[in-house]
Amino acid sequence: MTGLVDQINSFARRMPTWAVYLLLGAPSVWLFYRGLTGGLGIEPIKALEHELGGIALQLLIAGLCITPLRRLLGVNLIKFRRALGLLTFYYVCLHLLVWLVLDVQIPAQIWADIVKRPYVTIGFSAFLLLVPLAATSNNWSVRKLGSKWRQLHKLTYLAAILGAVHFIWLVKGFQIEPLVYLAVILGLLALRLRPARRKQAA
């Protein structure tokens, strides 16, 4: 196990961060290409929304896994956490833009959906939480905000929970995938809270 961890850490040290942006950003181009060429089925806009939102949630969960991986297994992927966060926001923005521009299209209907449809309200709330997190994902903000930066970025967990609930509410019928996402997020949150409780007890 130690040998595998060492290999992963060695590979991570050699891998440039820009490669993560390139590799994980590429699926968005492929999805739009498939949408334009009829590769997303009879409802390409809905399929595009679903795929972009799903990738965003997966990347958000991947970012939340980085600290537990280092703490529990010794796998150090910290250098990629910011990239995962910004890529999450990128896919969320694409997901939102497809909904606004290609799906709803009518400006008056957009606000009505946000107010009247709970799954839209929850999804839009998750987006609003991610805005300040993306805006402060830079070295200047870390220095400027100090300890408040960590407090602010704890909102990532709430955004992830809202994103999973949005997914659960959105799908038709019983589907295991969004429930698995929510369970993983809650499990990661529990792992995050355990060290804090130990410190308080000490």
Image (spheres, rainbow, N blue to C red):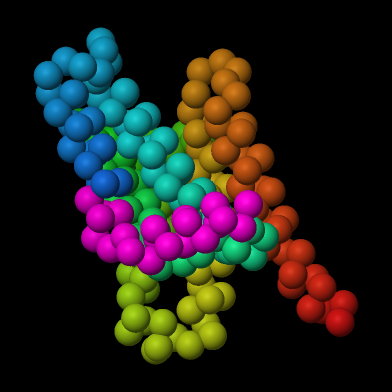
Q: Nearer the viewer, residue 122 or 16?
A: 16
Q: Is residue 67 above or below residue 97?
A: below
Rendering quarter of residue 142 = bottom left
Total residue callouts = 0
Image-based side of 51 in relation to 120, left or right: left
> What residue is drawn where x is 44% and y is 86%?
145
- The answer to if 134 sits in the magenta stretch is no
Rendering quarter of residue 3 = bottom right
> What residue is drawn where x is 51% and y is 64%?
76
Q: Is residue 182 above or below residue 71?
A: above
Q: Which residues are magenta?
A: 1-22
Image-based side of 30 in relation to 70, left or right: left
Image-based side of 18 in relation to 76, left or right: left
- The answer to if 15 sits in the magenta stretch is yes
Residue furthest left in the image: 37
Q: Nearer the viewer, residue 13 or 188?
A: 13
> What residue is drawn where x is 50% and y is 44%?
163
Residue 122 can be seen, yes or no: no
Residue 6 can be seen, yes or no: yes
Q: Nearer the viewer, residue 159 or 113?
A: 159
Point out residue 82 in the picture as x, y percentages from the top left corner. Answer: 38, 65
> What residue is drawn where x is 86% and y is 82%?
202
Point out residue 79 in the picture as x, y percentages from the top left corner. Answer: 40, 67
Q: What is the magenta segment's predominant secondary structure?
A: helix
Point out residue 89 in the picture as x, y percentages from the top left corner. Answer: 34, 54
Residue furthest right in the image: 201
Residue furthest top in the image: 42
